[in-house]
Image (cartoon, helix red, strand yellow):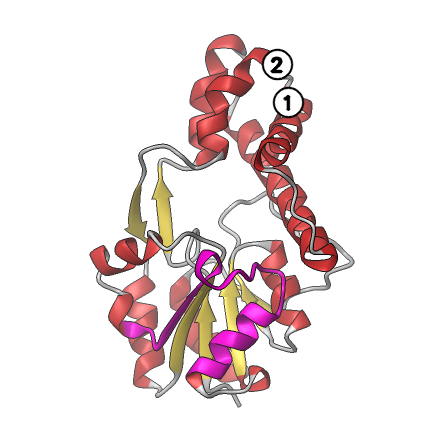
Amino acid sequence: MVRCVLFDIDNTLLLKKPAIAQKVFEAAAPDLPGLTLEAVEKAYAESEIWQGEQIRRENETGVRMEDQEYLQNVFWVYQRALGLKDELYASLRPVLMRNYHMDYEKMPGAEQALRALKDKGLALGIVSNNTRSVREALERQGIAPYFGTVVISQEVDLYKPDPRILELACQQLGVPCTQSVYVGDHPFDVLCAHSAHMPVVWMPINRFMTVPEYIGAPEYTVRELTELAGVIEKL
């Protein structure tokens, strides 16, 4: 029986505008006339897999890669996939750091889904690899009141796919992980949830994103948040 639903933020509850793939495309297109946004979205999916695996290694070893090296590796993923020139790294660095002006907007159906889950008497929470500034976006978009807890990696020094970040949220809500479900868009959201013995509803908005075989398949895959209430009833 599910008593609690935990959510990721980026690309799950909120959409960043412009997206990273769009910014990479805008920066690279002048030097690569044949470049397509589809190719960049595919490279973005590859870069997210690399980052998830790197964070997993860091969680296991306790050794964090220096920011400069980390960003250089992310750039190399795009470079190999798209044929970017070395000189483009300087202009892409702020984009890869997510250090550019962006706005958030609610994912379609977000408020409808949250209201439906609340009406079922479920506890709701957020678990996100993010900075504390994202709390302002949740407030601006009017969805912060739905959540009994918001666990942000920067604040607790725990990073998905470390299952302890999900366990912490469950502790704060007073619900065991086995009676909770996680909703996220990233393959390593699936890994994090399964490591916490928690079922997961995967909602990838990037069509090129796949879950590596060693992670295992999510219990459910949805395309829209409005599908959630029906899925939760089946768990």
- As displayed, is residue 134 above or below residue 45? below
Q: Is residue 54 visible?
A: yes
Q: Nearer the viewer, residue 233 or 123?
A: 123
Give the crowd class for mark 2: few <14, some 14-19, many >=20 residues within 10 Å.
few
Residue 86 image label: 2
Left or right, residue 226 beside residue 105 = right
Q: For the image shown, how many numbered marks are present on the structure? A: 2
SS category of the residue bearing label 2:
helix
Residue 201, position as x, y percentages in the image: 54, 68
Residue at point 57% right, 37% down? Answer: 67
Residue 174, position as x, y percentages in the image: 46, 88
Left or right, residue 150 beside residue 61 = left
Where residue 87 sits, quadrant-wise, is top right
- Disc number lying in front (1 or 2): 2
Residue 195, position as x, y percentages in the image: 68, 71
Residue 184, position as x, y percentages in the image: 51, 61
- The residue singled out by tag 1 in the image is 79
Q: Quadrant of the C terminus?
A: bottom right
Query: What amino acid is at disc 1?
Result: Gln
SS category of the residue bearing label 1:
helix
Precedes in sequence: disc 1 or disc 2: 1
Query: What amino acid is at disc 2?
Result: Asp
Q: Is residue 85 visible?
A: no
- As displayed, is residue 157 above or below residue 88? below
Residue at point 37% right, 48% down? Answer: 15
Q: Residue furthest bottom?
A: 1
